[in-house]
Amino acid sequence: MDLENQKRVKEFAEQYGADNVVVLLGAAEGEAAGLAAETVTLGDPTFAGPLAGVSLGLTCYHVCEPEVKAEFDPDVYDEQISMMEMVLDVDDICSEMNAIRDQL
Amino acid sequence: MSYSVIKGAGYILVHVPGMVMHHGTTQTTEKVVNPGSDYLKELPSHMRSYADCVAYPPNQTYIGNLPIEELAAIPEPWADKKVEKPERFGKFGEIMPEDEFILLMQACDVFDLVRLDKEFVAKTLPKLQKHPLMKQSILDLIKEGDDAADIKRTIEEEHAESLIFEDKTVGYVKRAHDVDVNLSAHVMFENLVSKASEVLSVLHLLNNAGIDAADVDYMIDCSEEACGDMNQRGGGNFAKAAAEIAGLTNATGSDTRGFCAGPSHAIVEAASLVKAGTFKNVVVAGGGCTAKLGMNGKDHVKKGLPILEDCLGGFAVLISENDGKSSEINTEIVGRHRVGTGSAPQAVIGSLVTDPLAEAGMTILDVDKYSPEMQNPDITKPAGAGDVPESNYKMIGALGVKLGQMERKDLPNFVKEHGLKGYAPTQGHIPSGVPYLGYARESIMAGETKNAMIIGKGSLFLGRMTNLFDGISFLVQANTKKNKQKAAASTKVPVIGIAAAGYELDPQNLVDAVEFAANKGCKAIVIDGEDCHAKMEAMLKSGEIDGAVTSHYPFPIGVSTVGRVITPALGKEMFIACTTGTSSTDRAEAMVKNAIYGIIAAKACGIEEPTVGILNSDDSRRCERALLKLKENGYPITFAESCRADGGHMMRGNDVLRGTPDVLACDPLTGNLMMKMFSSFNTGGNFEASGFGYGPGIGGNYGKLILIISRASGAPVIANAVQYASQLAQAGWLKISGDELRKAQQAGLNDVLEEMRSEGKNAFTKPAAKVKAPAKETVTVDIHGVEVTDIDAAVESLWEKGIYAESGMGCTGPVVMVNEAKAEKASAILKEKGFIA
């Protein structure tokens, strides 16, 4: 996750409280999604950005995960996400995301 | 007005390991943030040599040496693979080494900002002088060089940016202003690199497109740099600056920007400028970018890979007026990401791909190849960005599935069939759609693919002026100018009259023929009554009908008809010239004319270069001699080769059954006989069921479109004859006929025929005095090509010269037989006397 985004996530968590922030990802594959999730939960694994050594423990989902999909208006989801859902390896993304969440 | 075309393309790479370390932002940032990092320490050992860079398969694909399909066949990763024969130059451009490029940078600097070590110049200049495209005007701009001490001092005291070759400082780029950051040494360095690599791309383009530099009217630069001073930071104009060095003396230009989408925007602009007639030749070009060198270096080093981003990329494309053959840019099928489109991938792909196609009534399957961001996956995959082109193909396919244009199970196949392997360096605008233009142009012109969609996408949010995404796409297609001209000759469906005088079969055939013709999209009406010919003539004159199909109709002398049959062996169509009428009272002369009339009919039916064979019969050799002479005089005629082992232009029975030639030249009586056999051999003979009938009367200035059927032609043949007539009318047969006859006249048709007639009368009489045969010898060599009526004269002509000869009948016709030792001389004598061609 780039440094600017880490900074913004950190600021939101401080401003609204970690319990009130959900991070929604749109990464194109499992590894990248996992890295981003790790950054906003356990801390920046590359130790390069503002979240290095900072465990925010935020709730984090990828937009293609079933829990998130269930929250959407189906028409909006179909219009905005369904094509990418077909393209992405959703199972791989879900398992990466679950693996990170399991570490919390 | 017709679409503009892609006249040529140039693609170049420059191997610049020295710039990776000192100018790539990943490295320069690391030096500030983490100067002692392991990455910076390890980096030098991961740099590739020039030879390795040249041998790297994707680089060979970029410059045109390794077809994309062949690259795709090499298993990934490619970092450890080398092509068998690495070449610096390819059909699109080259991979230039860093030392020569540093000299080119100096040539591109007109403000004395680039200074070089004189020893380096002395060593490198001879190399650049050998460059096949380096003009003297460019070489003259390279200065002799400075002392190493002066170079060192300026770098230290004036913060000049070092130029490094093989780890040694060989020169610098200094700042162009004391305080203006826009003219700092760093910015000047980046801009001069961009300009120099752009110039190199243009030099290759000019060479590849075969255009004179002075013929370029306009140039658009579409790189991602900005040049200007503190009062106009992006003032421009790279295009004109590069055009000056490349010698485009009659061009002006401007810069187009749009991040990675810049090149696609620029090409749509260029195509539109040319189509509008504003300019005839517009160059679109982009130079390389130092900042992106080694961009993913950390990942590459971490994974033990070489630094694969060690090359600058450049490209140049020439967009010109339609030449009737080059691939076109269809500016009516242009996709654009609109302000209101949104940024969901679905919306982006919709706006760039499926929306413009849908407007043109096409689906994603109607485009053979898509060229989105053509990044080399060997670079992006280790960096976690995946295979970028492949992701794009999956998205296009998935949207197609959503729109019901294909089945989901066909998705992998779609990616394979409509996709391309990425091979371009990750230089932002360089890989964005345009790398494929060179290959697309060739593939479409060769008929291997019919079209390609070029898709440029740009991340505008990087400039922090908008959060919007951007993109523009266009379709490259086969040239349509020719087809349009044909279509313009007649846009309405011609009306063909059927006047079957003296018809012998059931008249219901005529009614059926009209219906059958309608099924083929043709319009026919029956003209009946005893005076049907008179009515037909009146209707042709008034324009009520565009052509007629008729029987029992006399043509004037000089006109003969070209029939069209379906030959039984292979089901191939063949034009028989002629089937009735009389083009000349001399048989051989008639056959020559018939051959030309056959060519006219075949061309009017869409065969661009019909092959001509001569029916192996009496007088056929005379006909062949005349046609060969016409060809020699410049009349374009393509001869068919007999399918028999001994080949030749004479068509045997086998060839006739197989339809070996497109046009079979013969005399009218034989042609007529063949027509009837081909049309009715399978019906018992009294009902002509197959073929297109006896064809149109052609000859001289005969201008009426009248095609002959027989009184025994059945409904299918009459319907085909109507179709034949419609084709001729739509193709503008009269103009084609006029053009063809004019070409034959220009090649001396009248003289050739006159010569042939006089030969017939005089030349081949036997020698006046009684000639005695020389002593008999063994005759084993056959000389072909003498007309049967001339065979005795030919033999005696040889006797007269002391060569023993006999006449005989070979399997293809008459032969003169001589002793092997004398064959050459005998042939020469017969040729000199005109017996053979």
Image: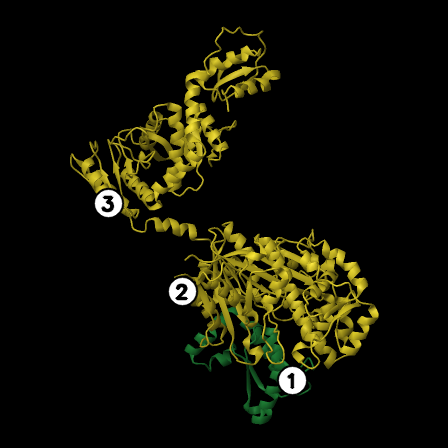
Q: Colour of chain B?
A: yellow
Q: In which quadrant of the rendered view does residue A15 lie? A: bottom right
Which residue corresponds to the image point at 57% horizontal and 57% vertical from the top-left?
B214
Q: Amino acid at mark 2?
A: Ala
Q: Are marks 2 and 3 on the same chain?
A: yes
Question: Whole-percent x and y of residue B3?
Answer: 44, 58
Mark 2 belongs to chain = B
Q: Nearer the viewer, residue B444 or B104?
A: B104
Front: mark 2 or 3: 3
Determine the CA span between mark 2 and mark 1: 47 Å
> In green, which chain?
A
Q: Amino acid at mark 1?
A: Leu
* Residue B292 in view: no
Percent coordinates x, y for residue B308 in the rendering: 69, 65
Rendered image: mark on residue B358 = 2
Q: Nearer the viewer, mark 3 or mark 1?
A: 3
> Which residue bears the numbered disc 3?
B543
- SS at mark 1 in the image: loop
Name the residue that disc number 1 marks: A42
10 Å crowding of disc 1: few (<14), some (14-19), many (20+): many
Can I make out residue B545 in this image? yes
Please say if A23 is above or below A86: below
Q: Nearer the viewer, mark 2 or mark 1?
A: 2
Residue B688 in percent (x, y) is at: 28, 33
Categorize mark 3 by other alpha carbons within 10 Å: few (<14), some (14-19), many (20+).
few
Q: CA distance from mark 2 to mark 3?
A: 40 Å
The secondary structure type at the circle numbered 2 is helix
SS at mark 3 in the image? loop
